[in-house]
Image (cartoon, rainbow, N blue to C red):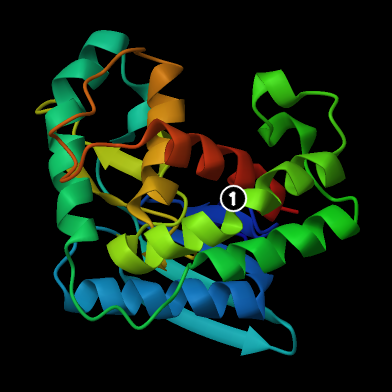
């Protein structure tokens, strides 16, 4: 891959490369993680959702290489506060469209996320940089234990309200045309699947608040966000990466 430039790592630990012309990206990493991303990208393409398209796939043993098209635009976290405010309605429209897709065969459900969190916590692999500021220094086992009493309620809410979630809906994973300030597509969809919409909104709102606090929430995303559910998913998600 001499004509590819390393550009970082994905959350799963996959190495990420960009082609010399900037038109393609390649990920090299665990075959299970990249298979999940490949299949979700193919499903989204079948629903005409703007984003990456699969160009090539190679697997050998427990490692794989996924090559996708690039998405035009800049990550939304690179916008100025005023730019993000202008783009916010387009972001909400794109999220509503994603959440409204029918017939998703993939799950990002709460039980799946809890199993991931239990594994990451048991291995001592939680990245402290991912934790909310107020949780810094608290043992991850304690953080997970605090969430367990809510599981029954959150399962019932998920069963009633589940939609197609991006799975890692942070601003860096939403691309925006810098000229028109409209969304051009989503990237990094390896965790896409059916879940409580608050699992997406918790991450979106948290990363948006880092740039432009106080952006409107009510009436834009197809529901009135529940602050308690936002908090629950914001506290669960950091425990699932490791």
Q: Locate residue 7: give its quadrant.
A: top right
Give me the residue at 87% from left, 36% from top.
Answer: 139
Foreground residue among 46 and 127: 127
Whether 201 is drawn above or below 62: the answer is above
Q: Residue at x 39, y 58 (%)?
A: 157
| Most distant residue in the left direction | 180
Q: Residue at x 38, y 36 (%)?
A: 204
Horizontal arrangement in the rendering, residue 45 relative to residue 6 (left or right): left
Q: Is residue 41 above or below residue 76?
A: below
Tell me which residue sits at (60%, 52%) in the image.
Answer: 10
Q: Nearer the viewer, residue 49 or 169?
A: 169
Q: Label 1 crowding class (10 Å Cα cut-off): few <14, some 14-19, many 20+?
A: few
The C terminus sits in image quarter: bottom right
Could you tell me residue 70's position as x and y percent?
A: 34, 55
Q: Is residue 43 visible?
A: yes
Q: Secondary structure at mark 1?
A: helix
* In the depicted structure, whether residue 28 falls above or below residue 3: below
Q: Quadrant of residue 160?
A: bottom left
Residue toward you, 48 or 94: 94
In the image, taking residue 78 as reference, residue 83 lies left or right, namely: left
Residue 74: % across, % down: 31, 34
Residue 163 seen in this snapshot: no
Is residue 109 or residue 13 the one in the foreground?
109
| Residue 223 location (% of width, % of height) | 19, 43
**Quarter residue 90 falls in:** top left
Could you say where residue 95 lies in the image, as x and y percent from the top left? 23, 48
Residue picked out by circle 1: 150
Total tally of numbered discs in the picture: 1
- Relative to 220, 20 lies left or right: right
Image quadrant for the N terminus?
A: bottom right
Residue at the bottom extreme, as displayed:
61
């Amino acid at each position: 891959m001499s004509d590819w430039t390393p550009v970082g790592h994905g959350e799963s630990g996959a190495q990420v490369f960009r082609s010399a012309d900037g038109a393609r990206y390649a990920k090299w990493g665990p075959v299970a993680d990249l298979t999940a991303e490949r299949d979700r990208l193919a499903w989204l393409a079948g629903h005409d959702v703007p984003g990456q398209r699969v160009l090539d796939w190679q697997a050998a043993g427990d490692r794989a290489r996924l090559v996708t098209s690039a998405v035009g635009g800049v990550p939304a976290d690179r916008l100025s506060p005023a730019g993000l405010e202008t783009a916010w309605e387009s972001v909400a429209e794109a999220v509503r469209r994603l959440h409204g897709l029918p017939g998703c065969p993939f799950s990002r459900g709460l039980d799946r996320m809890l199993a991931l969190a239990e594994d990451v916590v048991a291995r001592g692999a939680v990245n402290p940089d991912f934790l909310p500021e107020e949780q810094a220094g608290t043992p991850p086992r304690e953080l997970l234990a605090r969430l367990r009493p809510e599981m029954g309620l959150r399962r019932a809410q998920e069963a009633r309200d589940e939609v197609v979630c991006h799975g890692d809906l942070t601003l860096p994973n939403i691309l925006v045309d810098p000229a028109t300030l409209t969304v051009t597509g989503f990237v990094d969809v390896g965790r896409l699947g059916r879940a409580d919409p608050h699992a997406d909104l918790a991450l979106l709102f948290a990363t948006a608040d880092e740039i432009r606090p106080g952006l409107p929430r009510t009436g834009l995303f197809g529901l009135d966000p529940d602050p308690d559910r936002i908090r629950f998913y914001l506290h669960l998600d950091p425990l699932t990466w490791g």
